[in-house]
Image: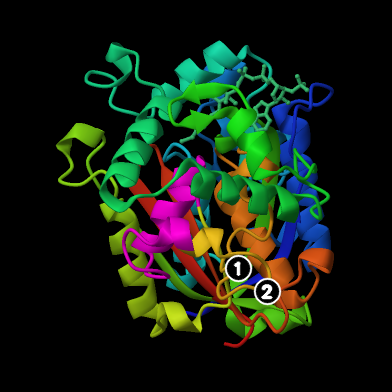
Amino acid sequence: MRDVAIIGVKTTKFGENWDVSLRDIITEAGVGALEDARVTGEEIDAIIVGNMSGGQFIEQEHIGALIADYAGLAKELHVPATRVEAACASGGLALRQGIHAVASGLEDIVVAAGVEKMTDISSTSASTALAAAADREWEGIMGATFPGLYAMIAKLHMHKYGTTSEQLAQVAVKNHANGAHNPIAQYRNKISVEDVLRSIMVADPLHIFDCSPITDGAAAVILAPADIAHKYTDTPIYVKATSQASDTLALHDRKDITTLAASVEAGKRAFKMAKLTPKDIDLVEVHDCFTIAEICAIEDLGFVKKGEGGKFTEEGNTAIGGKIPVNTSGGLKACGHPVGATGIKQAVEIVEQLRGDAGKRQVDGAEIGMTHNVGGSGATAVVHILSRDR
Ligand SMILES: CC(C)(COP(=O)(O)OP(=O)(O)OC[C@H]1O[C@@H](n2cnc3c(N)ncnc32)[C@H](O)[C@@H]1OP(=O)(O)O)[C@@H](O)C(=O)NCCC(=O)NCCS
């Protein structure tokens, strides 16, 4: 297996982008990443794109071919383009598949991208589309939506561990504060704990400010064998680990819904592959689709003991400057969550941090970062560890 490096990155503006279509934003991300890597179209060996539900959101399938065509890479160059899907972890999975392709030696230059265009339909239709990532026959059919499923996780976490609504709110407050410094974020306004607690209740105990929103956006990274990375960039970022794990699709089949076993397992596998522990990680982008999800994630990945995530967050340990900065980008909460793009955007944030290019969000001396991308309520988890040093 060959070592793999990320040599170029780009995330588009996340938000309600009604003036552009899916093909526009994914091309903007791809071209931006290629320019960043100083790679030409002729050099691309393959495109791998994460997209959860083009069919439901914009009535367009065959997204890989669409992208190759619209980017001008199909007609003469015939670049292979593959779409991968793992619900909200589609982006993370695209990155992992791209790493496999380069590490195996089959491809040299791979574009790993993610895209979703979610705001062209009503919020109700978007919720229905998203709910297809849960167990249709047991959860969706009963009317369960993701806010509803994560509300159950939150209720049990509060019951078992004494986690409070204020602690959940603190996740949103911290992520909005980080997002305020991120030009691509959907929400760049700072909020207070009181704002969160006063905001409309979506699914008790989750208020609207506890939820990630519905978002359009795209992101792309360029992968290359580590041995030739310096030909393209002075600041390659190296892939130290890629891992993935599965769990039951439905919540009711799990022993304990306050732990996402797929996150626990993907985290363990990634640490083993990188020969690192949570103490070695300087910052982490976790899958905060709801505030409770960030608390579960920092526990499941081993940054804090089970049950202590709420208190740890409330004490400021996950803020920039804290023990382990979490979601310096603003996370899914403030950046928005275009489901197919999120996993790639997380990697872009870590690359910018490790390059020292994160501006007011910069974590001083960041050398090793981690991403954690979850599909559905935890049936898929994908984890990556990235490093400045090979
Ligand atoms: C929370 C949710 C139900 C809100 O949808 P909605 O009721 O249609 O809300 P609207 O789009 O009408 O927004 C109402 C207002 O709140 C704001 N808003 C909406 N969602 C927000 C959020 N998550 N955070 C902050 N503000 C939000 C909007 O900007 C809007 O403000 P405005 O009136 O000033 O323009 C929806 O965003 C949602 O379903 N989120 C979860 C997505 C999800 O499940 N993802 C997959 C996770 S696994």
Is 29 left or right of 136, judged from the image as shown? right
> Of 326 and 161, which appears nearest the observer?
161
Residue 46 occupies which quadrant of the picture? bottom right
> Of 148 and 156, which appears nearest the observer?
156
How crowded pointer 1 is (Cα within 10 Å; few <14, some 14-19, many 20+) is rated as: some
Q: Amino acid at mark 2?
A: Gly
Q: Is residue 356 above or below residue 73?
A: below
Q: Is residue 350 above or below residue 111?
A: below
Instruction: Please say whether residue 305 is one of the residues in the magenta stretch.
Output: yes
Is 95 left or right of 236, judged from the image as shown? left
* x, y percent for residue 310: 45, 55
Q: Is residue 288 visible?
A: no
Residue linked to disc 2? 321
Residue linked to disc 1? 325
* x, y percent for residue 376: 39, 37
Instruction: Please say whether residue 308 is one of the residues in the magenta stretch.
Output: yes
Answer whether labels 1 and 2 touch (C-beta < 8 Å): yes
Q: Amino acid at mark 1?
A: Pro
Tag 1 secondary structure: loop
Q: Which residues are magenta?
A: 287-311
The quadrant of the picture occupied by the N terminus is bottom left
Tag 2 secondary structure: loop
Instruction: Classify mark 1 as within 8 Å of ligand 1 or not, answering yes or no.
Output: no
Q: Residue at x 71, y 62 (%)?
A: 43
